[in-house]
Amino acid sequence: MTPARSRRPGAPTRTERGIPEATVARLPVYLRALTALSDSGIATASSEDLATAAGVNSAKLRKDLSYLGSYGTRGVGYDVEYLRYQIAREIGVTQDWAVVIVGIGNLGHALANYSGFGTRGFRIVALLDADPTLVGERIGDMVVRDFAELEEIVAADRVSIGVITTPAGPAQEVCDRLVSAGVTSILNFAPVVLSVPDGVDIRKVDLSIELQILAYHEQRKSGEAALPEVPELPAMNGVVPDLPSVGGGVGA
Amino acid sequence: MTPARSRRPGAPTRTERGIPEATVARLPVYLRALTALSDSGIATASSEDLATAAGVNSAKLRKDLSYLGSYGTRGVGYDVEYLRYQIAREIGVTQDWAVVIVGIGNLGHALANYSGFGTRGFRIVALLDADPTLVGERIGDMVVRDFAELEEIVAADRVSIGVITTPAGPAQEVCDRLVSAGVTSILNFAPVVLSVPDGVDIRKVDLSIELQILAYHEQRKSGEAALPEVPELPAMNGVVPDLPSVGGGVGA
DNA sequence: TCGATTTTGTTCTCACGTTCACAAGCTCCT
DNA sequence: AGGAGCTTGTGAACGTGAGAACAAAATCGA
């Protein structure tokens, strides 16, 4: 029936021109590596060179790039400038994305000052906070505005990306406001699980989770199998060894 | 030959009591969810309740927990306090981990002020910077010290975790110093790929990469298939459309 | 022009991760 | 005491990701 239904059993389920998520997450790394090579005046690089610069192995890199198209030349390698442009275009950083930052505490401050937001392609159009004592403060060449102006700003500047740097408490409410104002991508630094409707993308950066993952591995390095030995079922209805309020961090 | 070599073909390759990496990354999330439930005075929770609080599905949660042992009760659920303690112990946050932060720019500042480092279990023992104009500055109840004192501090306080918040330039050098001083886990905020010897764990938090991943998905939302159309092979040895220095961000 | 050399693009296989579905086990009610 | 009703723990199926390996294509030298 379907003319060329070449869905082999083991083939990754991707929509037409869709790129696997794992690959998407690596494209920015390749982009940065290419930029570094370009700045060093290198015009052509093999997959091996690129892979080394990006910290992955070359087979993976070649496979990743193959999802974008055939941009290399066999026997030669990749043209650095050309590949850089193709990846940038695929990611979407050839155009500018308007970004708002909500929650101007320590972290919001740091991000606002982050020079050029680390990478071009993103333009901070507003710093917002609900605290009246913060509104009006100058940070770099921007002024903190009232969170109430959110909808207006999003509409005026076609903002599609919001960054949440509030404490955990108000984060969900802020998130809901962002979504209903029209923001469809959110980067969340607050230590909570946010729920968003379909169609809205959300990514999370969580400091204390990263540290805890490191701690897990650290624990099995020093003193192999030296977990604090504890009775297996000591206290189903009684006392549990004292535990400082781990994991509950609600502060920003 | 080998007595009980029960390596079934499809079984995940894990060493004795080793937990899959994907599961380890979720344990801190469960820990936080349990703490929230505990703070609400809830003593018992089903896998469904927990899964909702943690933002995952219940089958995954149950499987994750099963790697730790059988801590639930069929027909009832999990004792919140007890499970919380077991996870905390497994991760290693029942003990204190000494942490140094290197690079007291905007971000380092923010992390230093991060109340209780978001989560107990981690204790910042030093803020370090090589810039003499920063050394001596007070941040909260700490004073910025000279990076040259690193080795001394690591040895004195048994520091095993280092956080790098320098610009990209000095990051590898800082990393090398940390490693040779005895630090075996590193959390890197600098936008570079760091190389470390075996036995040292490294995790990376990269703001601009997160934004670029969001941009990728954003691009295929608005204007489906509306990638800027560009000739497929226009400029192997010629001009490439102008591209601001994307991905090269070296600022902190 | 032809073969040697290099390096990409792709196929194949295996490992890992997620989800379904259900038996095992616990509690509670009759 | 026994059965009904939940909920866990896990076996099995499925989907995604990683890496080895190789055929296809391009360059270069003779």
Image: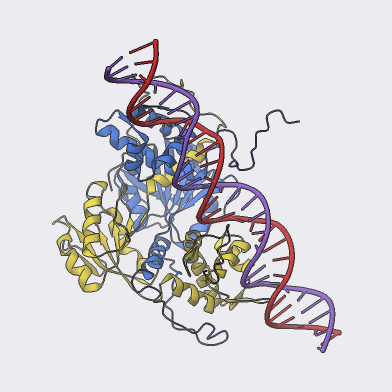
Chain colours: A yellow, B blue, C purple, D red
Find residue A44 and report its horizontal and vertical position in percent: 60, 77
Residue B178 on image: x %, y %:
52, 48
Query: Relative to A158, is B159 on the left or the right?
Result: right
Quadrant of image for the C terminus of chain B: bottom left
Residue that lies at the very extreme toward the front in this rendered image: A1
In the image, is residue B141 above or below residue A12? Answer: above
Quarter of the figure with residue A181: bottom left
Coordinates of residue A34 in the picture (x, y in percent): 53, 71
Q: Residue at x 18, y 65 (%)?
A: A151
Please tell me how many numbered marks the rendered image carries: 0
Q: Is residue C23 above or below residue A75?
A: above
> From where the camera sits, is residue B146 visible?
yes
- Give the quadrant of the N terminus of chain B: top right
The reply to whether residue A247 is visible in this rendering is: no
Identity of the residue drawn at 29% across and 32% down: B38
Side (left or right) of A232 relative to B111: right
Apparent side of residue D30 relative to residue D8 in the rendered image (left or right): right
Quadrant assignment, res A74: bottom right
Viewer-side residue, A181 vs A221: A181
In the rendered image, the vertical position of residue A84 relative to residue C22, given as above or below? below
Rendering coords of residue B193 (x, y %): 52, 59
Q: Residue at x 45, y 69 (%)?
A: B247
In the rendered image of this protein, does residue B79 appear above or below residue A8? above
